[in-house]
Image (spheres, rainbow, N blue to C red):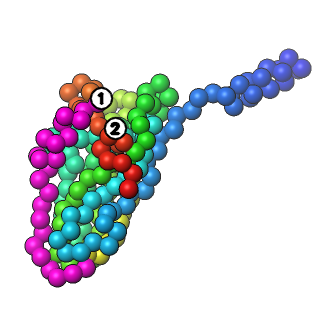
């Protein structure tokens, strides 16, 4: 009985020193905080360690239905501390410029689990208002964003190039 209590106490004490994974992405936010018609609006996500926002051709995917906007970001997520090497920082992705009005931005990420199955997770739903005179929407040239970022690649997994959050943009 005493031997079991000693073993259990030792296991508990050692578990306090065990390394744990620190996967995190803070809630997304937009900049500028109070956009005007014609301003390029970006979504920003602070995170790192075991999570990172990446970029490859085809991502991010931005769709709009009326005043509802959705951005789907490519992401990585690890639970094993051995795979958690991403720097902490803020990923910033432009979503476009919009005319005056009220909008809702849904920010989703997609990543693969250990078995390679895609997981889509909603990081946040952000209502925002664009003030000022109405102007036509200006789409973001995502191909140009890819060309500008491709030289900053730091980590490659298979044919997918990932960009650590801190490398994409410093924290606002």
Q: Which residues are magenta?
A: 131-154
Q: Is residue 101 visible?
A: no
Q: Residue at x 21, y 68 (%)?
A: 39
Q: Residue at x 19, y 34 (%)?
A: 151
Q: What residue sits right under mark 2 in the picture? A: 164
Q: Residue at x 30, y 44 (%)?
A: 168
The picture places residue 76, in percent across and down from the top left corner, at 35, 37
Q: What residue sits right under mark 1 in the picture? A: 155
Q: Is residue 50 above or below residue 125?
A: above
Q: Are marks 2 and 1 in contact (CB under 8 Å)?
A: yes
Of 34 and 161, which appears nearest the observer?
Answer: 34
Of 130 and 57, which appears nearest the observer?
Answer: 130
The picture places residue 155, in percent across and down from the top left corner, at 30, 29
Quadrant for the C terminus in the image: bottom left
Quadrant in the picture for residue 116 = top left
Q: Residue furthest top?
A: 3
Q: Is residue 172 left or right of residue 140?
A: right
As for residue 5 lying within the magenta part, the answer is no
Q: Residue at x 85, y 17 (%)?
A: 3
């Amino acid at each position: 009985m005493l031997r079991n209590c000693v073993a259990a106490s030792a296991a508990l004490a050692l578990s306090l020193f065990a390394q744990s994974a620190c996967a995190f992405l803070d809630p997304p936010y937009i900049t500028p905080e109070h956009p005007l018609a014609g301003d390029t609006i970006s979504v920003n996500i602070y995170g790192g360690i075991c999570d990172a926002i990446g970029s490859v051709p085809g991502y991010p995917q931005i769709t709009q239905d009326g005043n509802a906007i959705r951005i789907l970001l490519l992401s990585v997520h690890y639970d094993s501390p051995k795979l958690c090497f991403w720097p902490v920082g803020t990923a910033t992705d432009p979503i476009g410029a919009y005319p005056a009005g009220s909008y809702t931005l849904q920010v989703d990420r997609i990543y693969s689990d250990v078995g390679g199955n895609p997981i889509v997770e909603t990081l946040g739903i952000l209502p925002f208002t664009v003030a000022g005179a109405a102007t036509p929407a200006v789409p973001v040239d995502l191909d140009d964003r890819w060309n500008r970022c491709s030289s900053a690649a730091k980590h490659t997994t298979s044919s997918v190039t990932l960009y650590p959050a801190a490398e994409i943009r410093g924290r606002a």
